[in-house]
Image (tube, helix red, strand yellow):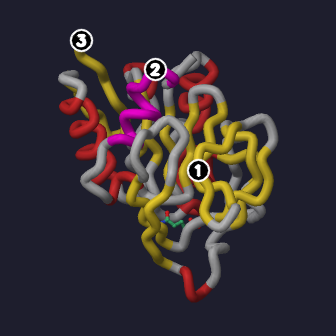
Amino acid sequence: MSLTAGVVAVQGDVSEHADAVRRAGAARGEAVTVREIREAGVVPDCDVLAMPGGESTTISRLVREEGIADEIRAHVAAGKPLLATCAGLIVASRDAGDERVDPLGLVDVTVRRNAFGRQRDSFEASIEVDGLDEPFPAVFIRAPVVESVGDASVLATVDGRPVAVRDGPVVGTSFHPELTADPRLHDLALFGDGAGE
Ligand code: GLN
């Protein structure tokens, strides 16, 4: 089987996500074609999507300006998987707590940007993730805090705060699974049994 994975590529750590998706596919013996999404018309060809970390105000603005935002919504409404990491989670959230971000409302959480605190701007933590057998090496960079969770399930926490959530076909993480060599989070979100609906 051959799958097409789209990486939202208007801004952020796009190539890292593309590599991580390829690694996750290879680990399953799946041929994955990766398409970088910079304009409208590509998302409908994609089986799975990833929205990277970067700068949420910029990503939010560009996906709307380029007409990609509605296509991402339609993708998720069709039950197809989306992995949204860090800034991607902020953009995918219901409420980003920042008027410069116009969130897509795909993950029923409210988030606060850059909220782990100055001392903890960037850190790594080995965390238990629901659905993974062994702890995952999570890299946090000016990460958002998930402040409240509505109709979504929490997959992982750090210091009692949710850092990975699932809302139907969408998995959102405060951290950056694309910045490690470990493909399990991409696999869980995009190709796993629970991926999509
Ligand atoms: N601090 C960034 C934002 O608020 C997110 C950081 C990241 O994606 N590494 O958009």
User: Residue 98's x, y, as percent?
Assistant: 74, 65
Which residue in the structure is indicated by mark 2? 193
Q: What's the CA distance linking mark 3 and mark 1?
A: 31 Å
Marks 2 and 3, the one that precedes in the sequence: 3
Q: Amino acid at mark 3?
A: Met
CB of residue at label 3: within 8 Å of ligand 1?
no
User: Residue 81's x, y, as percent?
Assistant: 50, 27
Q: Which mark is residue 156?
A: 1
Residue at the spot 57% in from the left edge and 34% down from the top edge: 170
Q: Could you say whether the residue bearing mark 2 is in a helix, strand or loop?
A: loop
In the foreground, 105 or 116: 116
Residue at the spot 55% in from the left edge and 32% down from the top edge: 72
Q: Is residue 118 visible?
A: yes
Q: Is residue 75 left or right of residue 149?
A: left
Contact between labelled residues 1 and 2, with CB atoms less than 8 Å apart: no
**In the image, is residue 95 above or below residue 80?**
below
Which residue in the structure is indicated by mark 3? 1
Q: Amino acid at mark 1?
A: Ala
* Quadrant (top left, top right, bottom left, bottom right) of the C terminus: top right
Q: Amino acid at mark 2?
A: Asp
* The quadrant where residue 133 appears: top left
